[in-house]
Amino acid sequence: MTGTLRAAPEDFRVDEDLGFVADGAGEHVFLLVEKRGANTDFVARELARYAGIGPEAVSYAGLKDRHAVTRQTFSLHLPGKRAEPDWQALQHAEFRVLQAARHSRKLKRGALRGNRFRIVLRDVAGDRAATDACLAAIAVEGVPNYFGEQRFGRGGANVERALAMFAGRRVQRHERGLLLSAARSHLFNAVLAARIEAGNWRTPLPGEVWMLAGTHSIFGPEPLDAELARRFGAGDIGLTGPLWGKGALRSADEVVRIEAGVVAQHAQIAAGLEANGLNQERRALALHPAEFSADWSTDRDLELAFALPAGAYATAVLREICAWTTPPAGASAAPAE
């Protein structure tokens, strides 16, 4: 199947779910902001300018897509008896403030439950029956939990830049974390791809490290038995792959052989991650979109809705449905609302 993604910003909607609400008092102002065609850092700087504070006093839980309509919370540090700006008077072509509330703590990176997506794929062409079967399978079985292409920069260049950093090229401090994340994500994706190619990314093997559903808690390895198989079949636990760093792989037996074999093919990346102080962690191999629904609004337009936990990518879901293209910059294949 083929289709067009982001024909207009309104075709890619994201609503952040922090998992908590502001407590109503404190030195921090939580702003719920809707932005269209703007990146998160730009909005943060504009909010700081309007409030008359430095950009370091504005924080957010995570970056959101630029070519989209997104709603997310920004935290502004406004202590003391300082008069709060009139947020309703803030007029900007690319974003608007929907709500404002005080909170006792700063909003930190990663402090969110997840995101809700509503996405329209336009001009979908191909085997309709096969697509419907794929959608039904996603609702039941989930998709591979790949890191999305936005993690790797334009043309995937962040991995090459990370290798150059490992070889001694100096980078700015804010770049370091970005490049380390890209390199680590590349290695995880390679392990996941190897298990998909072998046909066992959803088949428990001897030596698995397990993750409890809905958490980042892991356990194992331990001998495969009927109880583990039952829990896996019920969706209570899932398989994991390595987020590379210092220390030995936790997996064993057949799984450690697969993982070590893939890592050996990317020895420079693995060594660079270890040298930069990262520790071994694990990530789920499968991603299960919550509240997944799909509707053909026309014969060529497919509307999708689902929720994902923090750290998961909508593009991991979309890649299983069709090969998409995006309109050239400045073009719009569909009218904006």
Image: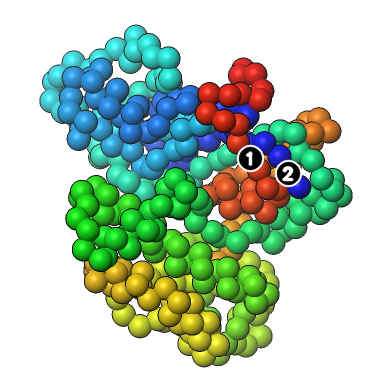
Q: Which class describes the residues within 10 Å of circle 2: few (<14), some (14-19), or many (20+)? A: some
The residue at which mark 1 appears reads as 325
| Residue 329 appears anywhere in the view | yes
Tell me if residue 223 comes above or below residue 93 in the rendering.
Answer: below
Q: Which residue lies furthest to the top in this view?
A: 89
Q: Which of marks 1 and 2 is nearer the N terminus?
A: 2
Identify residue type, mark 2: Thr
Tell me if residue 76 comes above or below residue 202 in the rendering.
Answer: above
Give the residue at x 67% y 54%. Answer: 320
Q: Position of residue 238 (x, y in %)?
A: 57, 70
Q: Is residue 252 left or right of residue 172?
A: right
Tell me if residue 177 comes above or below residue 304 in the rendering.
Answer: below
Quadrant location of residue 97?
A: top left
Report helix, strand or loop for mark 2: strand
Identify residue type, mark 1: Thr
Report helix, strand or loop for mark 1: strand
Give the residue at x 26% y 39%. Answer: 106
The residue at which mark 2 appears reads as 2
Give the residue at x 51% y 52%. Answer: 148
Q: In this view, does 148 lie to the left or right of 121?
A: left
Quarter of the image where the C terminus is located: top right
Give the residue at x 22% y 58%. Answer: 169
Q: Where is residue 84 in the image (x, y as percent from the top left)?
A: 23, 17
Q: Is residue 232 left or right of residue 94?
A: right
| Residue 151 appears anywhere in the view | no
Q: Is residue 33 left or right of residue 141?
A: left
